[in-house]
Amino acid sequence: MAEHDLTSRLLSPRSSDQPHTVLTVHDGEDSEPSDRPPSNQQYSIQTRIPYHNHNHNGINNENGHVSCQNPYEFLGSVGFSVPAPSTVDPFRNGTPFISGVYEMIKIVLCLPIALARLVLFGACLAVGYIATRIALEGWKDKQYPMPKWRSRIMWVTRVCARFILFSFGYQWIRRKGKPAPREIAPIVVSNHVSYIEPIFYFYELFPTIVASESHDSMPFVGTIIRAMQVIYVNRFSPASRKNAVNEIKRRASCDKFPRVLLFPEGTTTNGKVLISFQLGAFIPGHPIQPIIVRYPHLHFDQSWGLVSLAKLMFRMFTQFHNFMEVEYLPIIMPPDHQKQNAVHFAERTGQAMASALNVVQTSHSYGDLMLLMKAAQLQKEKPWSYMVEMARNESVSQALKLSTFETYLLYHISSLEAVDFLDKFLSMNPDNSGCVKRHDFLRVLQLKKACTLSEEIFGFLDVEKNGSITFKQFLFGSAHVMKQPPFRQACELAFAECDVGGDNYCSKEESLNSFVSDCFWISWQTFLDRQFQI
């Protein structure tokens, strides 16, 4: 697409009976280019749409499909690209079911052992809980480091944690390397495979951890992690994440606090890959010691995956021995300008950990796990096919060689937004391969089947031109349209044009939110229907 200045028309000149859309950008003052969209830019859209019949037939291509133009060119869209689907599922447990004669016999033989282990587990949990309550009794200044006498009481709980690991079948744990002194590496990061690692690190390092707010309400466990002076974070709240980063920086800067432990993947995986890292551990700019954990196995995969906690505990109790290996890697120093290079710091750390584990690091994130769980909850045949590697979105926009401003806008969608899009997509009744046909797409979005504009909208998403769309195409295409700079004003214009009676039937806020959530084509099609009775 040819370059345009900020006041030129986005569409090439057409005949007088065609729509004309002009985008005008008002700058409050001259400024240098930035990686983020300038806050003082204002967009105004002036649209004049004479009568145009959209019911004419489309032009067929060689494959018999309708050749569609870009229906969002008036927004400045130049199209979008969708990366090839990944064949890797980082959350799949390799042994979700008990299978094989050997496993059945082993479980039967280990049932008496499992009962003894269960008793040991319960006793150690009770003793550790009581010791923790004693250590926390009367302690009110929890913003400061725990007094030494209270920390000595917590050694009782730490020893109990080691016996809990013993009850789960970890009679011995192989270690390689040593933890660096806290003064040298105040932050440690680790891959996250099971609920076993937090128990091990509690015994081994007694660190401060960063955890979800939901952990505080867990029976017994909530009390114990409070003794670790946990830093709570709500992953969906930008303010909470910012406060957590500030708290990590404050505690890492004070030698009287224990070292800070983070699982930068943000969730558990199957240990066969690393997924994308969150930046909370890397923004403060302190030296970091990576730690990797392996669970060698033949018959029982100890990763959490989508296996229930009770089932995973039962399988651990009924093993002769569970293998665990912990390796402390060399310290990784931050770059000179850390605030500008937190991403590179995370990449270097991820590469070091992936190399030591002999695995690759994918672009999956916690958002992909949310999509997987949503599809699994609705009993879709291949729930893993709905993952989109959300952390790759930024690299995709860079691969398109778009401007810095467009790169920032295109695919920065949240996990919750992605789940909302999945809800909409699943209502279109995708087939067993996870694809939606044109008639289901038009039915759910209430678009006219005989309308050329409807064909263009579907063709815009059908990047492979095979008559069906995947969830990744639906998500990327929707995000691409919604993140165009004039999108919101275009929705406002569509609403104003729809309200021909001036009675404001729907509140502007409600209708605008509906347009945003269901994507712009619904509002624009409604606008055209109301105006021209297409």
Image: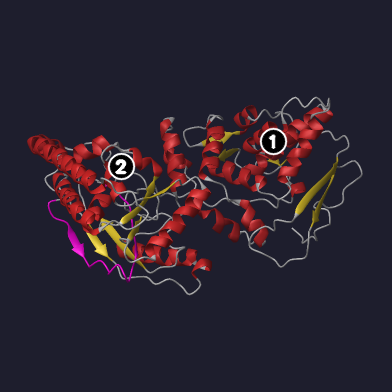
Question: Does the magenta stretch mainly form a helix, a strand or a loop?
Answer: loop
Amino acid type assigned to the residue bearing label 1 in the image: Leu
In this picture, is 353 found above or below 89?
below
Q: Which residues are magenta?
A: 171-196
SS assignment at label 2: helix
Say whether disc 1 or disc 2 marks the residue closer to the N-terminus: 2
Are discs 1 and 2 less than 8 Å apart at CB?
Answer: no
Q: Nearer the viewer, residue 335 or 68?
A: 335
Instruction: Give the class, few, some or many, for how many residues have Cα within 10 Å of label 2's Cα (few <14, many ≥20).
Output: some
Which mark identifies residue 222? 2
Residue nearer the viewer, 532 or 175: 175
**Which residue is depicted at the point 87% across and 48% down?**
14
Magenta region includes residue 119: no
- Circle number at residue 49: none
Left or right relative to 369: residue 356: left
Q: Secondary structure at mark 1?
A: helix
Q: Residue at x 54, y 46 (%)?
A: 414
Q: Looking at the image, is 172 positioned above or below residue 32? A: above
Q: Nearer the viewer, residue 85 or 20?
A: 20
**Mark 1 neighbour class, 10 Å CA radius: few under 14, some 14 to 19, many 20 or more:** many
- Residue occupied by mark 1: 512
